[in-house]
Amino acid sequence: MKVALQSVEAILVDLPTIRPHVLAMATMHRQTIVLVRIRTADGIQGIGEGTTIGGLSYGEESAEGIKLAIDTYITPVLATCDLGRVAETMAAISRHVVGNRIAKSAVESALLDVAGKRLGIPAADLIGGGRVRDSMPVAWTLASGDTGRDIEEAEAMIAARRHNIFKLKIGKRDVRADVAHVAAIKRAIGDRGSVRVDVNQGWDETQADLGMALLAEAGCDLVEQPVARDALAAMARLSARHALPLMADEALHGPRSAFTIAAHAGARVFALKIAQSGGLLPAREVAAIADAAGVGLYGGTMLEAGVGTAASAQLFATLPRLAWGTELFGPLLLTEEILEEPLVYADFALQVPDGPGLGVAIDEDRLARFRRDRTAPTLHVLGGRG
Ligand code: MUC
Ligand code: MG
């Protein structure tokens, strides 16, 4: 029987961060997430999340644009679809909406939540034939902007057994100053943790050559997106010249870009993100391309809150190879929890929620407190049962 749409809500939610998060292109003091709530005519509610970083400074989609794409262009397509058929619904959306991968990922997550709830199984069982792991390692990003504070933060994380993989945000300062910062943190942590960097496209190829050579000496394990996302030839040359693995992040936009990067040996590792890929299903295709090409996988984040993090975890739980772990720490960077039950982080890992669908529920009181349109929610209500 066709599963018809009852209503769609795309809700902007502003959540403060626990400290300023300093990236090469922006300093975050809060995170804006877009929560999507899809209700079906037969009474099931699915939730999804679309989130980006730093307004429009990271990519082409902003939180406000994600909401607009869903409200104005995706909702009318959803109204024509059998929502029980997730892949078919997403294909219909893609016929009408080009790009807008984060918006699509949020909607696809909500549809998988609906589908899982209908069948009483986790989303992982729908998309990948089930889990191959119940928990996954989680990195923490040190990005306070201050070396001493970052070391204190790393020490506290190790002591609490929460994280022992650290990603350092660099690319804003002179290369040597950045490497000195990384080297100081690695010296303090020693063998108790892995230190990696994310340059967020901050370098040109010459700077990257110098940076990668110095970072290797400093004991860094991985360099994420050192050069511009469209500098594929430079990524390939850097990958060929340096033993230190280069990870593609901003360069990845779903399966086709993954194939192109892999075919040109532009990266040794992929930062796999459901948002950047356009959903869990296309992200799984990216993972398959990586596996076939011998490219390592790292479970990436767009610093989503609980819903997007749970959706990512549902996918990452199904991947046979996840050599570099994940960075699904988004909810821990926020001062406010909007899930009824927070995700569980313990022993350096995130536990995969095991309820039906995404396995998480929204705390409605907290959502009401932090949604941007506290007085006038946008709810698209469509016809009755169909
Ligand atoms: C990015 O570029 O990888 C992920 C973790 C973090 O601190 O920032 C993000 C975005
Ligand atoms: Mg990155």
Image (cartoon, rainbow, N blue to C red):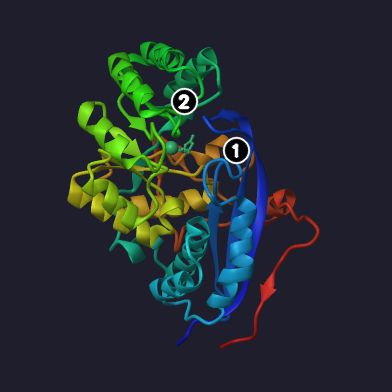
37 vs 195, left or right, is right
Q: Quadrant of the C terminus?
A: bottom right
Would you name the residue on which mark 1 appears?
334
Q: Amino acid at mark 2?
A: Gly
Q: Which residue type does callout 1 highlight?
A: Leu
Image coordinates for residue 148, horizontal then vertical, percent: 52, 12
Can residue 132 be seen in the rendering of this structure?
no
Asked whether disc 1 touches disc 2, contact meaning CB atoms under 8 Å apart, the reply is: no
Q: Where's residue 346, x and y in %?
A: 42, 36
Q: Answer with the quarter of the image where residue 211 lies.
A: top left
Mark closer to the observer (1, 2): 2
> Residue 16 shows which numbered tag?
none
Residue on which the image places disc 2: 171
Q: Nearer the viewer, residue 7 or 158?
A: 7
CB at mark 1 closer than 8 A to ligand 1? no
Tell me how many marks there are.
2
Given the current orientation, which residue lies at the most extreme right position? 375
Q: Nearer the viewer, residue 238 or 149?
A: 238
- Residue in view at x 31 percent, y 54 percent: 286
Picture layout, residue 75 above or below residue 14 = below
Comparing 168 with 214, the one in front is: 214
In the rendered image, which quarter contains the N terminus? bottom left
Q: With respect to residue 200, does 192 lie above or below?
A: above
Label 1: few (<14), some (14–19) or many (≥20) C-alpha neighbours in 10 Å: many
Label 2 secondary element: loop
Q: Nearer the viewer, residue 237 or 198?
A: 237
